[in-house]
Image: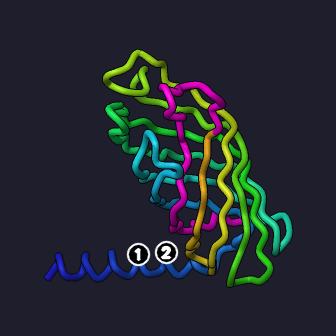
Amino acid sequence: MKSMKKTILALGLMTAGLVSAQSADMRNMLKVGVNGGISVPAENAGGNLGLDLSYQNLVTPGFGLGIATGYSHFFGRENDGIDNNDFGVIPVAALIRVYPKQTGFYLGTDLGYGFIVGDEQVASNSTVARPDGGFYIKPEIGYHNQDWNFALQYQKTFTGDKGEIGSQSYNAGAIGVGVGYNIPLGK
């Protein structure tokens, strides 16, 4: 009986916490999400999976600014005898969002620098060094409500001609989808 009372009390406290979180001021929020996609062009990587973490402040009800980071893991693929290694991208970026309505479609982008991490070489059967990073951009269009964001997005870290092997360019870009949850931080 005591464990039943404790369970009911715990559920009541969790429900109260969720209800108060839903009514909190949504001007400042933490956004936590996941993303996945296919590499374009798919020369050295086949696809990616990632985690997103960002902070957003609504400057006006329809315009948000913030900072964004996370991790995207790109899965290396074999390409004409080149055995490409997996690698990751860690962005440090400014977040910009435009919300025409309180719920509905939105536009946005993250702009900054993408650090490329992983094996030192582009491929396991090559001595060509992997790039360290470059200019990072992640434009997206999506749907949002108070709690969730669903987006179509493109992410790219520009590396110039670093990491090229023969006719294979080094690519750290993907087109895909993302979903994120908004955690209100209050005023």
Which residue, as the protein is rendered here, is positioned at the far left?
Answer: 1
**In the rendered structure, which amino acid carries the disc numbered 2?**
Gly
Tag 1: Cα neighbours inside 10 Å, few (<14), some, or many (≥20)?
A: few
**In the rendered structure, which amino acid carries the disc numbered 1?**
Met
Count of number-bearing discs: 2
Whether residue 187 appears in this view of the structure is: no
Q: Where residue 159 sits in the image (x, y, percent)?
A: 62, 32
Compared with 166, 105 (above or below) is below
Closer to the camera in the image, 177 or 83? 83
Residue named by callout 1: 14
Closer to the camera in the image, 87 or 14? 87
User: Disc 1, disc 2: CB below 8 Å?
Assistant: yes
Q: Residue at x 71, y 57 (%)?
A: 109
Which residue range is magenta in the image? 158-187
Q: Quadrant of the C terminus?
A: bottom right
Closer to the camera in the image, 89 or 46? 46
**Image disc number at residue 17:** 2
Q: Residue at x 52, y 49 (%)?
A: 41
